[in-house]
Image (tube, coloured by chain):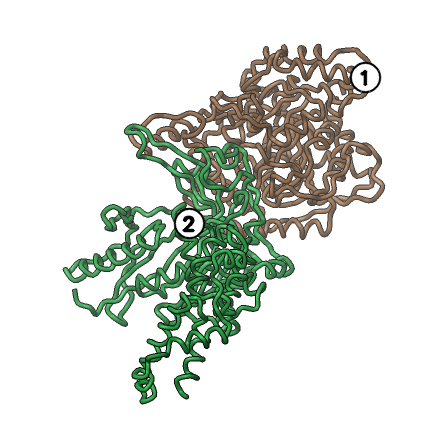
Amino acid sequence: MSNNWEMVIGLEVHAQLNTSSKLFSSSPNQFGSEPNENVNFIDSGMPGMLPVMNFACIEMAIKTGYALNFNINKYSVFERKNYFYPDLPQGYQISQFEFPILTEGFINIDNDGNQKKIRIERAHLEQDAGKSIHDIDPKFSFIDLNRVGTPLLEIVSYPDLSSAEEVVSYMSSLRQVLMYIDVCDGNMQEGSLRADVNLSVRKKGGELGTRCEIKNLNSFKFIRQAIEYEFKRQIDVIESGGKIEQNTMLFDTSTGETRAMRSKEFSHDYRYFPDPDLLPVNLTQDQIDKVKTSVGELPQAKLDKFIKDYKVDKDIAKIITVEKQNAILFEKMISETDVKPKFIAAWLVGDIFAFIKENNLEVSSLNEKTKEITDLLKLVSDDVISNKAGKEILPKVLNGQGKPSDIVKELGLEQVSDSGELEKIIDEALIGEEENISKFQSGSDRVLGYFVGKCLKATKGKGNPKLINKILLDRLKK
Amino acid sequence: MKNSISHIKNSLRNKKISVEELYDEFLIKAKSSKNNTFNLLLDKENNILSIKESQKRYENGNPLPLDGIPLGIKDLFCTKGIRTTASSKILSNFTPNYESFVTQKLLDDGSIFIGKNNCDEFAMGSSNETSFFGPVKNPWKNKNYPTDDLVPGGSSGGSAAAVAEGTCVASLGTDTGGSIRQPASLCGIVGLKPTFGSCSRWGIVAFASSLDQAGPLTNSVEDAALILNSINKHDFNDTTSSNHFREDYSNDINNKLDQKIKIGIPSDYLKDVSGDILSQIENTKKALIKHNVEFVDVEFKTTEYALSTYYILAPAEASSNLARYDGIRYGVREDGKSLDDIYLNSRTKGFGDEVTRRILIGAYVLSAGYYDAYYRQAQKVRRLIKDDFQRIFNDVDFILTPTTPNEAFKIGDKLDPISMYKNDIYTVPTSLAGLPGISIPSGLSTNGLPLGIQFIGNYFEEKKLLQIAALAEKELNFNEQ
């Protein structure tokens, strides 16, 4: 394979909105219920049933509009997309087609330190379909309509992506934003966020090729695998003299391969037309403005603030802002103490996250314990206890075994910071070290480490290393 | 009038008859009818509780507005626990577990359903000949061909014929392009199609959602007003239900007109019509002119496009509305080797020819490459038709037209769908505009068959519309002819 090929990718991301009820019915919108439990007469397509729009979905779309820099359209229209399938009881999906609620947005992604702006063509509201289950009985298929009518926001990018890494970065940035503004739980395993990948190949800078659409990818790993496989497949076809057919592909997660599901010839004619059961959505400026206050601070703004105002290292700030609950915990701690944010941040992404991971906890579960944590960090940063001692105590504090100061006392971990006492110890340690002292005085810095170690040992590790250092230097320079 | 709601209520109040006796009387008559007006009749046992409660209210002196009145319900309204078929094979075994909004309002007002009226399959037809349960016969006979069985009109043909034959006091029908007004006209009764958005569509088997509207078929204009009082309510579960102020439509209905009324007669509607039809309009003019009513000629610019517009838009919506009848979850399923076979067999065998024809027309006009030429174009014309009506309503209070271009015809006579579609020429424009229209019987043809006239009012002006219709009814005195 010659390496002068490049891929051109556009993404259609389906985000399930985390409303309490469905897009056009009052059935609960929740995952994990018994099959067909969250289904009413509207969802099951009974004769004469009518959809009624859930305005919470419109508000979430508006919120997304603000967060992803979209034009928020006052006028949008729900249309019917007609096709037959047993998990689509109405015989049509209500979606937006000609007049979507959001148009022309963008998001900036960061790919190994390079910023890239990805343009988003549109985002529209639509109903999810149910689930057909074909693999639990040899003779019968089963239908679960729980998911029918779940609100989806379909976010359609321009073909601005040119590698699997960029796609993953784009998708995770979207996920991060949607979770920050609390419109989607981001749970890809449960299908709350899924992507269709449109991919074509071309010679670098050449004309666009024919694209194939890989449907319904629900993990970053699968997205990456599918893109890499499909990229190679298309190049192989072309280089062996073939032509790419515009196909809809399925990704087989067991083999890591894509295969054609249906060709364009057999593609559906969906016969879209405005749903006569629903009036067009006509939003007032007031309705749009009202949502703005609920958007909150977005991940990029938080990141900038952490770096600029709190002087947190960029890499650490990124880790904290990945998820909203990290940032919430961090900002809560900052507000409760005068310990430097940078110091707290290092502890957060280090020992505190390690503890969370080890104990399989939610980050938000520590929101109740910020006082204890910051008390402990204060002891460390004030040199009352050593860094090492702090690490030792942290799990006890997080497990609720007592106040940090009590634990420190109990375990006798307070550092010796009394200079008189330390001077005595240091003077004793220097006895009989004339040779090393003269080595130091003739310019060998390495000896200093040796002396510090010797003194610390003499204090059984409790001596304040900074103070020891200072006194030692005084003595040695004489 | 003997069979009017107020007359019957008086008899019940004065204990001349009990609710149960009344029900028996109508049921016996309905059971012996040879006109096939009902797909299903409800034996007294089914309604005994409602009958007793209604009787109790009469005895306590606090009857509800429609208390004890036996009504027919077009078999297009979902009725809880009562089979609802839309006169189609595909729903011939379907019993809903919910009650449509409007029939619930009728029950809330004390009426008692005697049965489900035959109609055209999925309300598609103008003669009630497309029903899976067979055609309905018009109780009227052509005096020159007295052995011919005539159509009652459609699609609410069973409703109209049942009211005309006296097997229910009134019936609830639906009108999409004339399905209440046209059969009312052919059966010599009153039929009202309210403004689109007046009566909730929730629980009505949908034909064309942007046009479907429930309305009464009755013996008198006053009865139509009483039924309208009951069903004309705002419903949050129907997005297209209007939240306007609703009046009491029956009180003051017979009051004298307190101001000068101007009625437009569209000259373009009266080209090429028979002398019989023309004389209905002339008689109405004569009858009303003495009541401070002025008649003026008006002319539409869009009439010739109305039928084609309707037969693009209604089938387009129908093709999608009927997609849910796939044999998977309810209704009749025909087996097949594959999923596609099940769909194909269930829908091929489950739908009749006219329904199949309209689904195919609808799918065609919405399909890629044809959408702009047909569906989008038709939507634009629909807007022009609406504007055309508003232009005329700038100048007049009502529009007067014939309801149909002809009297009732022989069953089996109109086999060509186009000539059948032309029956709705005077009712379809009103439907496309969403305006209210009422048909009242105005006289007899030379063959001794009833003919009707239609008054069209502006949006939500049912109150005024019913008043002018009541005045014309009184003056034309059809029931005494």
Return the x and y of residue B179 as percentages of the image width and height. Answer: 58, 32
Number of other residues with Cα within 10 Å of mark 2, as a class: few under 14, some 14 to 19, many 20 or more: few
The structure residue drawn at horizontal position 64% and vertical position 34%, both measured from the top left corner, is B277
Locate residue B464 relative to residue B126 in the image: left or right. Answer: right
Q: Which chain is green?
A: A
Q: Is residue A398 left or right of residue B445?
A: left
Q: Is residue B279 visible?
A: no
Residue that badge 2 annotates: A359
Quarter of the image where the N terminus of chain B is located:
top right
Q: Colour of chain B?
A: brown
Relative image position of residue A418 (x, y in whole percent): 51, 72
Instruction: Identify the element where label 1 is drawn.
Output: loop
Q: CA distance from mark 1 to mark 2?
A: 72 Å
The residue beneath circle 1 is: B60
In-front residue for pair B165/A319:
A319
Task: Examine the rendered structure and indicate whether residue A204 appears above or below residue A406.
Answer: below
Residue B413 position within the rendered picture, expressed as x and y whole percent measured from the top left? 49, 26
> Which of the pair B386/B460 is nearer the observer?
B460
Residue type at numbered disc 2: Asn
- Subunit bearing disc 1: B
Q: Position of residue A265 (x, y in %)?
A: 29, 49
Residue A187 in sight: yes
- The front one of A88 and B184 is A88
Q: Tell which of A251 and B355 is nearer to you.
A: A251
